[in-house]
Amino acid sequence: MMRPAPRSSQDRPTPNEIEHRLATGELRRVRRSTYVPAAPDAPVFSTRRDIREVLLRAVRRERLDGVIALETAALLHGGRALREPAAVHLVVSWNAAGLKRGSRRRPANRPTSRELGPRDHRRALGTRPFVRHRYELSESDVVASASAVFARRGFAATSVDDLVRATGVGRASLYGAFGSKDGLFQRCLSGALAALGPGSASGPTSAPDGADPAGGASALDLVLVSLMELAPDDAALADEIGRALRRAGVSATDLGERLLARADL
């Protein structure tokens, strides 16, 4: 198994030494800057196990998005697999604007995965150290989950880690899709303002077509968070909220009653 990198730069192999050891078969490249010793007489399953352990350390060290799945997950939990996997499979929740990935250099004559046929595509996936499997998650689901967190905890008290746990979307994907925590909150607030109605202070209302399901009391909670934390320093936001409240017929009394209800008074 690959040993931890030595602390002393004098003991660290130079790029030329690494290339020489790769050429002589002493090392095997797993991925960029990641190698394992390549013993000629080592069984295949032993080499694959070493590769898997190195990749798992990379998952923890680099905090890669995703949940470990398939054979690797079974082995981590003490189970058995019909074969020793040479790759780590990660299930990632969402890819609205691209997951965070390390840079890679692809030769100009090498086709992309989309240009490959089914058989060649499966073969190419088998050579990757990390294989990512995605399941679709709609933006409205992400916004609804984030809205519930913001409404319950407030804007300032909600961290990005809170949003990652609530939505199931990786940090990199959240930033890629919404730009920042502020951008996600603005998206949640827009859905909440669209969902406001005369009964918002006491219960849920049906949101218009295309609006996020943040209706009813939850929508009003999000509005209260905006009024208390953001509107005092943002006149444009205060005007936008005021117009939405008047349009929905939500009075100051409704706001006060909901504020008392939030405080259990």
Image (spheres, rainbow, N blue to C red):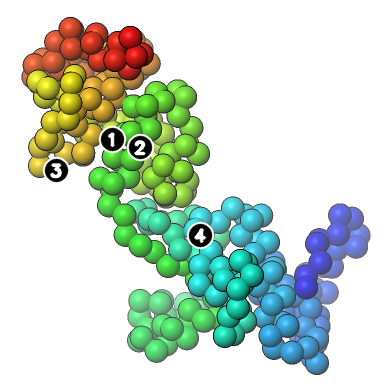
* Residue 67: mark: 4
> Alpha carbon of mark 4 to alpha carbon of mark 1: how far?
27 Å
Question: Looking at the picture, which amino acid does disc 2 mark?
Answer: Ala
> Alpha carbon of mark 3 to alpha carbon of mark 4: how far?
31 Å
Question: Looking at the picture, which amino acid does disc 1 mark?
Answer: Arg
Residue to which mark 3 is pinned? 210
Kindly state the secondary structure of the residue where label 4 is placed.
strand
Q: Nearer the viewer, mark 3 or mark 4?
A: 4
Q: Which quadrant is the C terminus positioned in? A: top left
Residue drawn 59% across the image and 85% down it: 83
Residue to which mark 1 is pinned? 187
> Alpha carbon of mark 1 to alpha carbon of mark 2: how far?
10 Å
Q: Earlier in the sequence, mark 3 or mark 4?
A: 4
Q: Nearer the viewer, mark 2 or mark 3?
A: 2
- Residue 130 visible? The answer is no
Q: Nearer the viewer, residue 219 or 258?
A: 258
* Residue 202: mark: none
